[in-house]
Image (cartoon, rainbow, N blue to C red):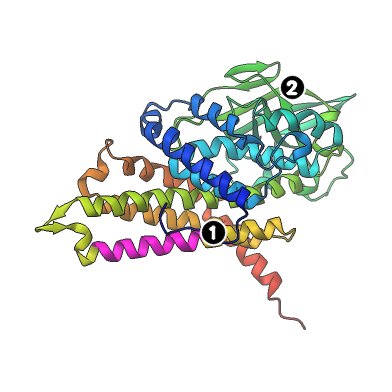
């Protein structure tokens, strides 16, 4: 373990959890990640190993069979896992966001039913806001949930579901006009539905179809899908929290912690890129000496290491703020923006250090080069983060009078 990206003030339990996860990454993920990624193969054996370690229940309270750990512990684990293979951290992240939303907003019956099985990884979660053609404009969603007796009938099309095929529980944001007069703000007429389904593709239950995997440049292994709702009937007790019209706030709360997670992923990928770059620079020689002894390469390494350290510090700060019970949307937005941008830059510098070999699929940096761009758009684009940051700064620094 190198000097970079250390975290002060961790308890012995946190340190032990991180050592265990890091050991798992080094032994079980790094040796197979590139081969699985090139085959676009779901890492079933890795997922089973993480289930056994208890990672799927890391933040689920102990009363429901989880470890009851903090967002900081979770984010540091994600950083380690993303250092091994970012796709694996994506499998966990969507599950974690749904579990977090249930813990924070679910009814007692919903918590009792879902959380113990989620802690064991028996139920694995996915969540869905986006739709074709609207991207980050969540308020424009058109998928509808209409009351029909004791049920709701859901109709519409969702896009970009991580774990869409392998998950067995999907939290889906829909528009519900029930009890909301005309002219109600769009975000006040949205509801989160908890949809249980069989893993797989095709029509996985009547009225619910997962067409298949979306082919992607990177972020392979994990399945990213569409979700088509065509008259899907959902009982009213599967409205998250039991009350319609609260979906937007519930989802935004989940995305806020999800942004800390994406920042942690950026930190992990950047760390791995730095490790590969600094190692290769000491092994490759030009003009009679290792390229690490050339000033041009030392400057790159210095810039890369500084970015790794800065991104890690901001991610840790955002997690600790949320753990303290304070609002952290500003810090989470900043951390996600900085970590994803720095990740892209560190990966590119490591790619340049590798020279022509960076373009070869035999070298790990080629995989990281295709993975890093996803972080620029996942959980809200860089531009969305800057909008959030700017608005929050104007709230904080408003001129009075």
Where residue 90 appears, x then y in whole percent?
54, 38
Which residues, given as a range, are shown in magenta? 297-312
Residue 307 is a magenta residue: yes
Can residue 170 be seen here? Answer: no
Q: Answer above or below: position of 173 versus 236.
A: below
Mark 1, other Cα within 10 Å: few <14 / some 14–19 / many ≥20: few
Where residue 375 appears, x then y in whole percent?
49, 48
Residue farthest along the bottom direction in this orientation: 401
Q: Secondary structure at mark 1?
A: loop
Mark 2, other Cα within 10 Å: few <14 / some 14–19 / many ≥20: some
Dominant secondary structure, magenta: helix
Residue 284 is a magenta residue: no
Q: Which residue is mark 1?
A: 7
Indicate the quadrant where residue 189 lies.
Answer: top right
Can residue 292 be seen here? Answer: yes
Name the side, left or right, on which 344 lies relative to 389: left
Name the side, left or right, on which 9 lies relative to 300: right
In the image, which disc is placed on residue 231? 2
Name the side, left or right, on which 87 lies relative to 240: left
């Amino acid at each position: 373990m190198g000097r970079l990206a250390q975290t002060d003030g961790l308890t012995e339990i946190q340190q032990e959890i991180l050592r265990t996860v890091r050991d798992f990454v080094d032994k079980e993920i790094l040796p197979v990640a590139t081969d699985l990624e090139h085959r676009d193969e779901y890492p079933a054996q890795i997922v089973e190993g993480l289930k056994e370690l208890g990672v799927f229940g890391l933040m689920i309270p102990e009363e429901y069979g989880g470890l009851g750990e903090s967002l900081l512990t979770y984010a540091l684990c994600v950083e380690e896992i993303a250092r091994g293979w970012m796709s694996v951290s994506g499998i966990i992240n969507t599950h974690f966001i749904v579990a977090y939303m249930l813990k924070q907003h679910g009814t007692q019956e919903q918590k009792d039913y879902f959380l113990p099985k989620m802690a064991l990884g028996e139920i694995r979660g996915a969540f869905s806001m986006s739709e074709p053609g609207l991207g980050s404009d969540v308020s424009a969603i058109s998928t509808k949930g209409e009351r029909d007796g004791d049920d709701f009938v859901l109709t519409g099309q969702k896009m970009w579901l991580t774990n869409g095929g392998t998950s067995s529980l999907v939290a889906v944001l829909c528009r519900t006009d029930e009890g909301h007069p005309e002219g109600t703000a769009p975000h006040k007429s949205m509801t989160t539905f908890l949809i249980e389904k069989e893993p797989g593709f095709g029509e996985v239950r009547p009225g619910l179809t997962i067409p298949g995997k979306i082919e992607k440049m990177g972020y392979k292994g994990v399945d990213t899908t569409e979700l088509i709702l065509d008259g899907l009937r959902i009982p009213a007790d599967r409205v998250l929290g039991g009350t319609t019209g609260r979906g937007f706030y519930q989802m935004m709360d989940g995305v806020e912690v999800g942004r800390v997670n994406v920042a942690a992923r950026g930190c992990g990928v950047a760390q791995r890129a730095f490790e590969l770059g600094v190692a290769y620079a000491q092994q490759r020689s030009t003009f009679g000496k290792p390229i690490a002894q050339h000033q041009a390469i030392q400057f790159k390494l210095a810039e890369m290491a500084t970015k790794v350290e800065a991104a890690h510090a901001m991610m840790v700060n955002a997690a600790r703020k949320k753990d303290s019970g304070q609002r952290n949307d500003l810090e989470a937005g900043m951390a996600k923006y900085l970590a994803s941008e720095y990740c892209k830059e560190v990966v590119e510098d490591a790619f340049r250090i590798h020279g022509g070999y960076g373009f070869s699929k035999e070298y790990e940096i080629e995989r990281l080069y295709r993975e890093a761009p996803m972080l620029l758009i996942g959980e809200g684009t860089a531009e969305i983060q800057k909008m959030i940051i700017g608005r929050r700064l104007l709230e904080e620094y408003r001129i009075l009078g």
